[in-house]
Amino acid sequence: MSNGSSITQFLLLAFTDTQELQLLHFWLFLGIYPAALLGNDLIITTIACDQHLHTPMYFFILNLFLLDLGSVSATVPKSMANSLWVITAISYTGRAAQTFLFLFLITAEYSLLTVMSYDRYVAICKPLHYGTLLGSRPCVYMAAAAWGSGFLTALLHTATTFSLPLCQGNALNQFFCEILQILKLSCSDTYLREVGLMADAVLESNCVHPGELRTSPVTA
């Protein structure tokens, strides 16, 4: 079996073995991907330029679309290139970068959605305290906490995954580099790691505690 230290590239799963369908996949995503980029860019530009939209909720939406822009760009272009040139290989460095970026951006999105739900809770249940609980500084702190939690989580899981020796070949049963698929190539028993990864994904949404960022005590 292959040793992890000798593997220089990995093979990603193609959407189909038929070349015509792979080209169809490329043209389909060639239409969807630029539309997604344009839509996200327009929303980000509108929020940034319109003074009336400089509110906490739109500030979080701007961050959310930035993360969405990155998460789409981390996987779709490589998948399109593989379909166009009928190749499935990705370098070891490329695999590490894609794994880290995708996990970082997705985790940060989940954390930011938790913050946005808190924003709506305050707006509905405590409207008179909204300006105090969600001032400019607490909003920046909560957004930074969401980005930071995503970065730290991605760094931890990527470093842990890449420290494992691989001996089950180099073919990933996915069209992008997913940690659970990488763990299946490991020589060691990864059951506990997989369970831990899933548990972390569930608990990650609670890693940002907006209530702790209040600028002053407020009673209902």
Image (cartoon, rainbow, N blue to C red):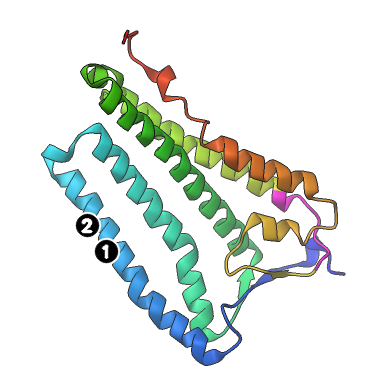
The residue that label 2 is drawn on is 42
Q: In the shown orientation, is residue 25 left or right of residue 33?
A: right
Q: Which residue lies furthest to the right in this view?
A: 1
Q: Residue at x 38, y 27 (%)?
A: 141
The residue that label 1 is drawn on is 38
Q: Residue at x 58, y 63 (%)?
A: 94
Q: What residue type is labelled 1?
A: Leu
Give the label on residue 118, or none: none
Q: Residue at x 70, y 59 (%)?
A: 182
Question: Mark 2: few, some, or many residues within 10 Å (few <14, many ≥20)?
Answer: few
Quarter of the image that includes the N terminus: bottom right
Q: In the shown orientation, is residue 43 left or right of residue 37?
A: left
Q: Give the structural element (helix, strand or loop) at label 1.
A: helix
Residue 126 quadrant:
top left
Residue 89 quadrant:
bottom right
Q: Which of 124 and 139 is in front in this view?
A: 124
Q: What residue type is labelled 2?
A: Leu
Q: Which residue is drawn at 72% across and 44% down?
A: 195
Give x and y (percent) for residue 204: 55, 37
Provide the residue span drawn in magenta.
161-168
Give x and y (percent) for residue 59: 27, 38
Q: Which of 208 and 49 is in front in this view?
A: 208
Q: Nearer the viewer, residue 32 or 145?
A: 32
